[in-house]
Amino acid sequence: MRTNALTRLLARHPVGTDRWGAGAGLVLTLVVAVPTLALAEDWHGRPLIDQGGLTWLVPAFVVALAFFAGGALAGRHGGSLGRALAEGLWMAVPAVLVLLAADAVRRLVMNPTLPGGVVAYWVEGAAASVLFALAGSATSRWVAGHRRADQPAA
């Protein structure tokens, strides 16, 4: 029976085996991202991005950092880079789905029509969020590897 590389990777490094890592990363990400995005969507009665200027980059940066930190928390105990990335993905996808669902509900309540550019922004934001989480999980794995290398042998 032939298996592909992803199947072999997941067999060696099962996703979700670190009970607290992905969950803690998800909670951290949502605790930071939800209030930040809620504030950005109702800044002085209008979405911050619609007010002109570059001030909307501040909440975007905060949310990107939340995904990076959540990915780092999720991937910190991964035995290898592959497992750390899998844990980061395991954390990022539910966070992205929660945030997209919340924005979809908010938009349906506020305005039943959906502008065409919004879906493109959702896709770009989801992809960027997952990439930031993966970067965080890879970084935490790299830091953990260097920490282990710096410790003297017993």
Image: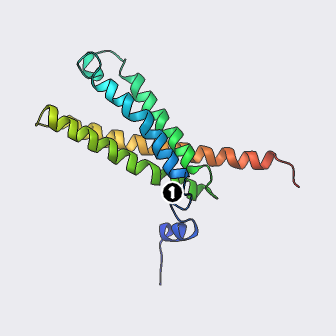
Q: Is residue 20 left or right of residue 60?
A: right
Residue furthest bottom in the image: 1
Q: Is residue 36 left or right of residue 135?
A: left
Element under disc 1: helix
Task: Determine the residue located farthest toward the left in the rendered image.
Answer: 112
The reply, left or right, for residue 51 in relation to residue 143 is left
Residue topped by disc 1: 86
Q: Quadrant of the C terminus?
A: bottom right
In the rendered view, tell whether residue 75 sits above or below residue 65.
below
In percent of width and height, residue 65 lies at 49, 33
Q: Residue at x 37, y 34 (%)?
A: 34
Residue extending farthest to the right is 154
Q: Vertical placement of 139 versus 35: above or below?
A: below
In-front residue for pair 72/3: 72
Residue sitting at x 41%, y 34%: 33
- Residue 73, percent from left and from top: 56, 45
Asked whether the viewer can see residue 115, the reply is: no
Taking depth in this image into account, of 26 and 121 the one nearest to the observer is 26
Applied colour scheme: rainbow
In the rendered image, residue 133, in percent from the top left (x then y), is placed at 48, 44
Q: In screen coordinates, is 76 left or right of 103?
A: right
Query: What percent of the width, then of the height, locates residue 66?
Result: 48, 36
| Residue drawn 28% across the image and 36% down it | 121
